[in-house]
Image: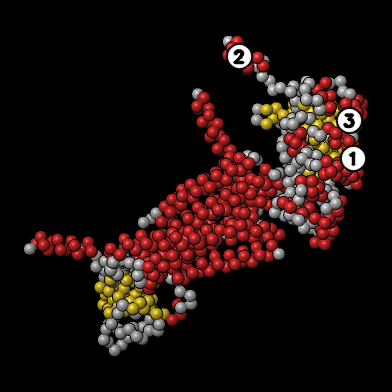
Amino acid sequence: MDLLRTLGDRTLERLSGLGRASIMWGHAVWGLPTLRELPLVIRQIYNFGVLSIVIIILSGFSIGAVISLQFYTQLSRFGAEDAVGLGLALVLLRELGPVMTGLLFAGRAGSAVTAEIGLMKTTEQLSSMEMMGVDPLRRIVTPRLWAGVISMPLLAAMFNVVAIYGGLIVAVQWLGGDEGGYWSGMQENVEIWNDLGKGVVKTVIFALLVTWIAVFQGYDTDPTPEGIGLATTRTVVTSSVMILAVDFILTLSMYGEF
Amino acid sequence: MRMRTVEISVGAFVLAGALSLVFLAVKVSGVSLGQSSSSYVLIARFDDVSGLRARSKVSLAGVTIGRVAAIEVDMAYGEAVVRLEIDGEPGQLTLDTGAQILTEGILGARYVNLLPGADEDTLGDGDYIEDTQGALILENLVGDLITRLGAS
Amino acid sequence: MSERAADVTVEDNLIEIRDLVFKRGDRLIFDGLSMTVPKGRVTALMGPSGCGKTTLLRIVGGQLKPDSGTVLVRGEDVGKLKRADLLELRKDIGMLFQSSALFTDLSVFENVAFPIREHTRLPEDTIRDLVLMKLNAVGLRGARDLMPGQLSGGMSRRVALARAIALDPCLLMYDEPFTGQDPIAMGVVVTLIKRLNSALEATSLLVSHDVHETAGISDKIYIIDDGKVVAGGQSQDLETHESARVRQFFTGSPDGPVPFHYPADKLEYDFLGDVGL
């Protein structure tokens, strides 16, 4: 009986958390940034995008190189080295670009947002904003949400470009494949909407997801130093799991026909 | 001053991201920018085009000269109608040019190979290629082989 | 009590709290608390740590909703106001938070300019004049370009004070303004609270447990304990209050009705327990 009650309490708690998060979400999406708030969005694009470039480039390069190496050694057994570029491009555009960027984004930008908002809550900055008659949701959440949606697709695009060049260096310079085949294999088979477009859609969805989780965790933090630490961890874990799960669903619905 | 460096770097970031997207579209997806003006269409009917897709390449003597624009099916004849987009101006390919569907390597992508003819007249925009040979299906060949071996 | 006789009509009280009940989880924080804050005066709210003084300020500001009872600010029931009306009311309330709550990503100038920019459409040079006036009032006109991280505790509290008065509010609320300040900074804050209250013709509600400083500037002091007002009046009245608990709080003696020891078994049990058993 006690177990049942605990279970019920837990469920209700989860539900109310989801409810609070959704209400916040609604408020924030509603608030398109006005011209006056543009500097805030720019500031956040700096935090989200510019500061993530190094990590994106480094991981993009190594992932491209590694996948290219594996593809090349396997495909060369069938004499299909020219398919390396195509395989790499498809894997990157459809899956790895959005997913890896999403995971890095969660670790780099998501955790920072949670910690920042958590700190603002702990130091009563959010309360004081409320007491000044300013809606903290509009001021804090909306710019971050939009900055995330703008930065993520761009970061993913950079990731893909760097990864394709990383793959090129391994397959062509190092393993001696044919550069023309590398490019033409991609150009003939990669489709602009089906591969590139749907990948971009994924990144936008992941950006909304990560920013939402990060902002909510920060906002819902227990206002203590331990609380911030826990919330930051929760952001990274929850967003990573959610990205992988949502990616699975998206892939099924986007490419599941065949 | 601090805000200014932020603005500049954000501008550079957005520009770099946009260029990356353009790169992915052009260099990876192979979207051609403004080249569509100098190309014309030939139509070929095949009995089987399995494995051929829109944007597959069209080559002549191993050189890519165009790509597959669209593939439709003609239910009445049970044939595939393939529209080929050939670069350049019409007036080069002869009227008896043949088309066959080949595979790059064993497992590679399908493409349309054009066989040069000897006629004096040339194909114009929208003309049909009469002499076609569809895709070779590995399973069918193997099946044929087995029945023939069984018969003998 | 003497304040009963002095109890006046609604018009003269900026804040009226009647039978306030507030629970946090299962814990009862306020249990039928009633008090009034007269217009134009400095009213202080004192009590031991954790008795919910800050919570009361949040209820007055409408950030928390009471479970029952009414809280009237300017005659409006804060607990029942719609969101938009509440935001409107808050423009007339300046609040100084215990941690100053300066926005860490904005400079001192921008911090003070923040409420002005958010709520008015004044031209940039008017905003500049206003901000410098407010900063001058707290003596920090020269620190306008510093970031909050570069300020000492006393300075950031003064900046926060300048920000709280940026829109010339009619009610100023101070949450523990004296805690964590060195004696000089404390003296500055005391002087500022007194001066600002008369200069702005505002009403101040102050929450603190620093008896000495609070007694020096308050016209009226309420002492709350166990969710109720246990005493109210001027500081002289409280020093000689009939309740031993109030006197202990006011004189700050370590032992008394509020015991020094956390409830425990008798000393002998803890040290000689196993011998005795």
Mark identifier at residue C235: 3
- Subunit bearing disc 2: C
Does C60 sit above or below residue A51? above
Identify residue type, mark 2. Answer: Gly
The earlier-in-sequence mark between 3 and 1 is 1
What mark, if any, has residue C155 been given in the picture?
none
Q: Answer few, some or many: residues within 10 Å of disc 1's Cα (few below 14, many 20 plus, some between 14 and 19).
A: some
Residues beneath discs 2 and 1 located on the same chain? yes
What residue do we see at 67% from left, 57% from top? A40
Q: Amino acid at mark 1?
A: Gly
Determine whether the residue tagged by mark 3 lies in a helix, strand or loop.
helix
Q: Is residue B79 left or right of residue C276?
A: left
Kindly indicate the quadrant of the structure image that contains residue C43: top right
Q: Is any part of residue C118 visible from this angle?
A: no
Residue most extreme to the left: B152
Question: Which numbered marker is on residue C273?
Answer: 2
Amino acid carrying mark 3 in the image: Ser
Mark sitting earlier along the chain (3/2): 3
